[in-house]
Amino acid sequence: MSNALHFLVLDAYPREIRAALRRVGAAEAGELYARLLRALEPDATVDVLYPADPDAALPYGAALAAYDGVAWTGSSLSVYVSEDARVRRQVELVRATYAAGVPSFGSCWAAQLSVVAAGGRCAAHPQGREFGISRRITLSAAGRAHPMYAGKAAVFDALTSHADEVVELPAGAALLASNAFSNVQAVAVTQARGTFWAVQYHPEYDLHDIARLCVLRTDELVRQGTFADPTAAHAYVEQLEALHRDPTRHDLVHELQVDPALLDGAQRQLEVRNWIELLVKGAAASRRPQP
């Protein structure tokens, strides 16, 4: 019997936003996660589904339990808009994943979704969007002891883009990391048989991905004062792209205040690797028949 892992990636963006991402030269979120999982586990099979789409054929029950791990992307939706069928569908899918005992991981929207599906609460951030680099994310005592952060610095920066945040954790949730912008920058939620490790930031992004998101979000970022005007946003995009092409540009590292760990894919993606190695593989081995 093959020991190759089988992952499900749930790209939570609506179809029209996936198209908008492509128009600005950004990869779709599901593609980023699929690429990352295949890089970390070359023998794995990865299916990508789109739960915001009304015609998506989503797995439940035994079909869901056939996966070794489920990875959720970010989204342009807001999880507290409960009357939105696209939100309700995804909340129910997370609950089904908990019940099926399939380990889950995700970024941004995923952290909010994991909490709301377990009875917690999220809201729009009063300061708007945290964008670009999330500074000085600090592990809690629980985070320092948690396997998701094995090998991670106790204080680190991460790439980010989010306008909503977790404001109330449910029973069964552990706060793993915070920073000055959002109290919940990482959370581990355990419900029924399932576990969901989630981060508010984006380990699947690199500087190019943030640059393309900046193009997509320029008007919003100017309105909230992140940039003085579109010209300033464009200059930021150009700097990010230049540093992405040439990580030895120490002038840009200094000007953008980029922690060298952000340019190291292994460090940037460590939480995903730890999820696979320390949660997914263990759970998969326990489910497979022994020889």
Image (tube, rainbow, N blue to C red):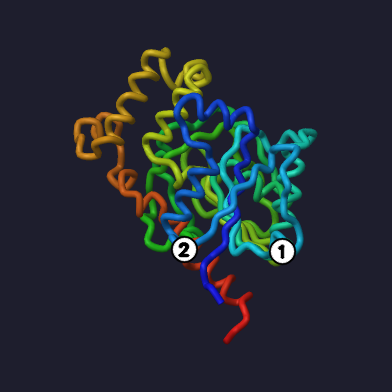
Mark 1 vs 2, N-terminal side = 2
Q: Secondary structure at mark 2?
A: loop
Q: Amino acid at mark 2?
A: Asp
Q: Amino acid at mark 1?
A: Ala
| Residue for point 63% across, 44% down | 112
Foreground residue among 280 and 1: 1
> Which residue is disc 2 drawn over?
43
Query: Marks 1 and 2, how far apart in space?
Result: 24 Å
| Residue for point 67% across, 63% down | 194
Q: Is residue 90 left or right of residue 249?
A: right
| Residue for point 42% across, 12% down | 229
Q: Position of residue 66 (x, y in %)?
A: 66, 64
Outermost residue toward the front in this view: 1
User: For mark 2, does the 10 Å Cα neighbourhood hold few (<14), some (14 to 19), or many (20 or more) residues?
Assistant: some
Q: Is residue 134 left or right of residue 51?
A: left
Dot label at residue 55 = none
Foreground residue among 154 and 106: 106
Would you identify the image quadrant in which residue 87 lies?
Answer: top right
Q: Is residue 61 visible?
A: yes
Cβ–Cβ below 8 Å for labels 1 and 2? no
Foreground residue among 211 and 125: 211
Q: Is residue 183 left or right of residue 97?
A: left
Q: Position of residue 191 (x, y in %)?
A: 70, 61
Q: Is residue 174 visible?
A: no
Q: Secondary structure at mark 1?
A: helix
Q: Is residue 173 above or below residue 32?
A: below
Q: Position of residue 45 (x, y in %)?
A: 54, 59
Q: Position of residue 14 (x, y in %)?
A: 65, 33
> Which residue is disc 1 drawn over?
100
User: For mark 1, does the 10 Å Cα neighbourhood hold few (<14), some (14 to 19), or many (20 or more) residues?
Assistant: many
